[in-house]
Image (spheres, grey):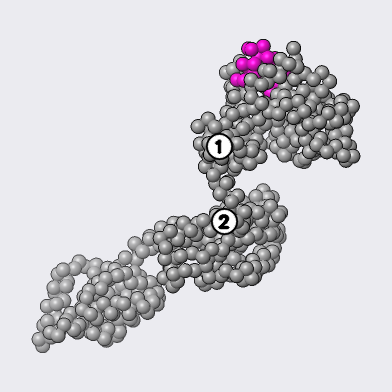
Amino acid sequence: MDNENQLVNKLKNIQYALNESAIVAITDKTGVLTFVNDRFCETSKYSREELIGSYQNIVNSGYHSREFFKEMWRTIGNGKIWQGEIKNRAKDGTFYWVDTTIVPFLNEKGKPYEYIAIRYEITQRKEYEEKLKRVAYYDPLTGLPNRNMLDGWLAMKAECANNATISVLMIDVDRFKAINDTFSFDTGNLILKNVAKRLENIIGTEDLLIREGADKFIIFLFNVSSKKEILETISLIKQQLSVPFQMKQERVTISVSIGISIEKLELHHSCRVDMLQNNVQKADTAMYHAKEQFGNSHCFNTDDQNVEQKRYTELELGLRKALQEEQFHVVYQPIIDIKTNKINGVEALLRWTHPELGIVSPAEFIPILEEIGSIIPVGNWVLQTVIKQMKQWHEDGIFINRASINVSPIQFRTDCFVENLREMLEKEDLDPKYIDLEITEGTILDIQGSQPILERLRNLGVYVSIDDFGTGYSSLSYLKQLPISTIKIDQSFISNLDEQDEMIVNTIINLGENLFFNIVAEGVETKEQLDYLQQQDCYEGQGYYWSKPVEPEKIIEFYGENNE
């Protein structure tokens, strides 16, 4: 009777202290339920009769590990309060979360003889947290983890090994843009989802697969370091992905390029994430080398690639501030009338002097400018600089007929390109006929897209030349359709002038004569080359035979020596 009164008083105190939403249960020291309140019954969907006398694990969901419950019993068994979040299962099979506090009641010897568990349902909050987690840590298209998952994955691996080898496989779908353009973005997305599923079936339980973005995936192989094992995995990847994807009425076949980097990481070290990200960058560099082999290939990271990547990073960082810090300048190479040896024009060439690395080749930094999106502001700066220089020369009595300016395909296709050029010319009051824009064959391969721009340029009054003619997608069709004034013969055909090169050069010169194009031979370096071009009636040339690219002041000297 005394025990009964103690229990009743205890319950009264608990109910008084708690609000109506509290889920209350009392168990004996073995875990058998001796009391549950109405809220417990409502939440668990069990009747009081079903619960009393049953073990408290009647609502066990199986979500938590044995170690989780061992730690809980270890705590309350030592007479301490335990707090935590538990996922339970109701009688009808639904799951619910409870924020739980378990209080042990001790006998005179300090040993627990029963436990009171006070719970509050937090299912909605946990579901909301889960949604946030999925947004933060998972790719919405494929359901794969994203980069944000890496830190937690590494921390988990650190618990089971102080040191481990992690091999990174950077996987990129070859020519994926062509798939989107040929079929549709929806088809492309379906293919990516199926690629993710096939890759998931390949990796082991210790490994991690993430979607890096766009058409890139990364596999992290835990403690797989031998090339033999990695090559077996790569072979399996290619085998699985080579099976065509059935997309409605179409069968789409893909290939992938894979870059591999292997590194032993000190997982307990605080900088392990930085080390892994460096490993990912190495794999990415190797993947681009694989792509250079025309896809469907793989490449291991090498020290040479690491040196190359380091330089690329240095150049990228430098280019982001080069324009603002006035590190660029423009030099000019004379374009010569082959018959009279007079200067007809100049080609403007961009140069960059890095404050630490010194002079960097345009062949190296121009592609980086295009990749990081800085080619448009830099290209505009070049246009402004050359237009100002031409105006200044004319004011000084140096009447050069034209300045040729190389234009990036990216800049050429911007909506405001022609209008920006018009404003620059009007600002300096320079006649547009003195400007000649040089574009590559690849830039105008899409005739429907390029023709309106070229027409607007012709209406503006500027000229357009095809640079490096013969090295790209040569086609007579665009020559007769587009308003082009000049063809520049690529220097690769001039440098050797063997029998085949002479045939190509002759053909281009005859083509220009018949279609009324001006022809400029680039890369003229010897008297023999000049004599040959004169025999073929080539109109203009440029190259080291006359002058290397020089500063504006040298052009004035050259003009004075040859044109007066």
The number of discs equals 2
Instruction: Indicate whether 499 appears above or below 12.
Output: above
The residue lying at 16 percent from left, 76 percent from top is 11
> Which of the two discs, 1 and 2, labels the residue nearer the N terminus?
2
Q: Residues within 10 Å of mark 2 (few under 14, many from 20)?
A: many
Instruction: Indicate whether 188 appears above or below 417.
Output: below
The residue lying at 57 percent from left, 34 percent from top is 353
The image quarter in which residue 376 lies: top right
x and y, in percent, of residue 230 in the image: 61, 68
Closer to the eye: label 1 or 2: 1
The image quarter in which residue 477 lies: top right
Q: Residues within 10 Å of mark 1 (few under 14, many from 20)?
A: some
Q: Secondary structure at mark 2?
A: helix
Front residue (pair 507, 27): 507
Q: In the current view of this chain or complex, which residue is farthest to the bottom?
A: 1
Instruction: Indicate whether 249 appears above or below 33.
Output: above
x and y, in percent, of residue 361 in the image: 64, 38
The magenta-colored residue range is 388-404
Front residue (pair 389, 181): 389
The residue lying at 60 percent from left, 20 percent from top is 388
x and y, in percent, of residue 407 in the image: 66, 32
| Residue 207 in view in this figure | no
Three-letter code, disc 2: Lys
Q: Secondary structure at mark 1?
A: strand
Is 245 magenta? The answer is: no
Q: Is residue 357 left or right of residue 435?
A: left
Q: CA distance from mark 1 to mark 2?
A: 24 Å
The residue lying at 71 percent from left, 55 percent from top is 293
Residue occupied by mark 2? 282
Is there CB contact under 8 Å for labels 1 and 2?
A: no
Residue occupied by mark 1? 354
